[in-house]
Amino acid sequence: MTDDRQQHADPRPTASRRRVLATAALAPVLTGAIGAVSPARAATAGPGAEPVHTPVPPVMTELADWADVGAALGAPGGMKRFMYHTPLLRRDLHVVSRGIMIAPALALGTHVSFVRYADGSSLLMGDAVVTERELQPFSDALYEHGIGQTAIHKHLLAQRPDVWWCHLHAHSTDPVAVARGLRAALDRTATPFPKAHAAFAVPPGVPLAVRIDLDTAAIDAALGVKGTADSGVYQSTFVRREAITDGHLLLPPGLGSTTSFNFQPLGRGRAAVNGDFAVIADEVQDVLTGLRRGGADLVELHHHNLADQPRLFFVHYWAVGDAVTLARRLRPVVDATNVAPMKGTGA
């Protein structure tokens, strides 16, 4: 779900006049001007034009700034530029989809991120993996603590047990209270809370080809992005080029707006590939048809957020086959969208 690397604003010519104006206003923020407090203000584009609001930007923080949040959540987190990010893999679940045992890092990860803003507020965004039995009590606990859900959906086809993904949202001046509420909700599930990420780390010095068992160099070349290894799964990530806002807040690039490929090795160069495409409305049909032509099955078409601009939709997919061949076949789908490799990870 949720890495954060800086990208340049680069909206497409087909964007509406409103989006072009908004993105132009945000370009300095995306190219490194974040830092000074920039209060929300309204500007008029011209006679009769709709006001264009300058969103509140995120501010850079340090790990120590989130110590109380980490303590309230009860799980170790880390910094991903503007985001305090905490992953929680559902290692307690044994999920099978179409005869394949799903690795937790492929599609069973709860991910939550906190971002501090120039007005002193904080934003929680993320998604949680819950079983069907856990879904209702988990949702009730979120509502009891003022945390909203912006999507409830699936990433996998025909899985057992049934698993759902819940996207989370909370904007508050008290992130510790939000973290406590999130922990209360997660306590209504069997989500394991690791004491340290190091417990799941791949031992240093182990060659990537051994622990992943895929031709990762060929996958990188096919997709045009340098992937990374995470808990036995190879991940390739792209980020939307536009400036993305959530209401009056400017989202750090990559938060809730990434296209991802997750490769789970199956032996002999084969892999199960699961992930999603972040697309605007004009790109949806090209992505759906492109995925089918590339040999992927469609899982979901839906939103992750309620107030994002430009409006983003997410297409979740599933494919099994030779990993490099699938990467080559799916590359045209990437090229049909306005994304770029995560900065510092590809050409």
Image (cartoon, rainbow, N blue to C red):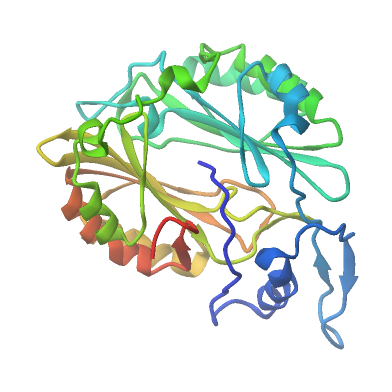
Q: How many marks?
A: 0
**Residue in view at x 81 percent, y 56 percent:** 56
Place of residue 98 in the rendered image (x, y in percent of width and height, measured from the top left):
22, 30
> Which residue is most to the left?
268
- Res 286 quadrant in image: bottom left
Query: 122 left or right of 188?
Result: right
Q: Is residue 332 above or below residue 186?
A: below
> Which residue is most to the bottom?
47
Q: Is residue 269 above or below residue 253?
A: above
Q: Is residue 27 above or below residue 2?
A: below
- Res 241 quadrant in image: bottom right
**Residue in view at x 47 percent, y 21 percent:** 198
**Residue in view at x 25 percent, y 60 percent:** 222
Q: Nearer the viewer, residue 185 or 251?
A: 251
Place of residue 345 in the rendered image (x, y in percent of width and height, measured from the top left):
42, 55
Place of residue 44 in the rendered image (x, y in percent of width and height, measured from the top left):
87, 79
**Residue in view at x 52 percent, y 64 percent:** 280
- Please indicate, yes or no, whether residue 122 appears anywhere in the rendered image: yes
Query: 187 left or right of 283?
Result: right
Query: 265 left or right of 240?
Result: left
Query: 151 left or right of 121?
Result: left
Figure quadrant of the C terminus? bottom left
Q: Nearer the viewer, residue 137 or 75?
A: 75
Place of residue 243 in the rendered image (x, y in percent of width and height, measured from the top left):
64, 64
- Please indicate, yes or no, whether residue 167 appears anywhere in the rendered image: no
Q: Nearer the viewer, residue 157 or 226?
A: 226
Q: Nearer the viewer, residue 108 or 148?
A: 108
